[in-house]
Image (tube, helix red, strand yellow):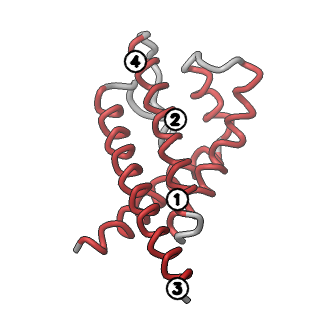
Amino acid sequence: MKRYLYPLLRVALGAIFVYASFHKILRPDQFADGINNYHILPVFLVNLVALTLPWIELMFGMFLIFNFKAPAASLAVTIMMVVFIIAMISAWMRGIDTGCGCFSNEGEAISIKEVVRDSGFLIMSLFVFAGSIRNGSKENSQAETL
């Protein structure tokens, strides 16, 4: 069971990021509106982030699914999750009535539910990062013995 947990979590986390990227890639205008609603970024950066972040999410999600550069991909996903959670908590604490924009720009305003969900994804990404480091060390030690 234990040896199947890391690949299962890695693929699941990758799939979450791939899925999250689709709506943002297809509707960057809506995603830009969602980003702007957080009132965190300067206006001149909103469109740049709306056009690039979904592709970054897609890329690192695919990296995780196909176990390509998994330590770097899982670290990037972990950092993104921390930033997303901080942004959501910031908007929530400031009373900004906006959707999270995680999977689409439709939905309810940010609440504890979204923060808890994304915190679960953060914990998942930490496990995947730890597993990718552990697996990478095993692969490196095996390669050195050959």
What residue does disc 3 label? 145
**Along the polypeptide, which appears first: circle 4 or circle 1?**
1
Q: Are marks 2 and 1 in contact (CB under 8 Å)?
A: no
Tell which residue pokes out farthest to the bottom in this image: 146
Question: Which of labels 2 and 1 is toward the front?
Answer: 1
**Along the polypeptide, which appears first: circle 3 or circle 4?**
4
What residue does disc 2 label? 105
> Given the image, on which type of amino acid does mark 1 rest?
Pro
Residue at 55% of width from left, 82% of height from top? 143
Instruction: Say which of 42 and 30 sits in front.
Output: 42
Q: Residues within 10 Å of mark 2 (few under 14, many from 20)?
A: some
Residue 72 lies, in percent from the top left, at 57, 55
CA gap between label 3 and label 1 equals 22 Å
CA gap between label 4 and label 2 equals 16 Å
Q: Are marks 3 and 2 in contact (CB under 8 Å)?
A: no
In what quadrant of the picture does the C terminus appear?
bottom right
What residue does disc 1 label? 71
Q: Which mark is residue 91?
A: none
The picture quadrant where one finds residue 60 is bottom right
Q: Residues within 10 Å of mark 3 (few under 14, many from 20)?
A: few
Residue 20 lies, in percent from the top left, at 51, 49
Question: Which of labels 3 and 4 is toward the front?
Answer: 3
Residue 139 lies, in percent from the top left, at 49, 76
> Given the image, on which type of amino acid does mark 3 rest?
Thr
Instruction: Say which of 102 and 146 sits in front.
Output: 146
What residue does disc 4 label? 92
Tell which residue pokes out farthest to the front in this image: 145
CA gap between label 2 and label 1 equals 30 Å
Q: Are marks 3 and 1 in contact (CB under 8 Å)?
A: no
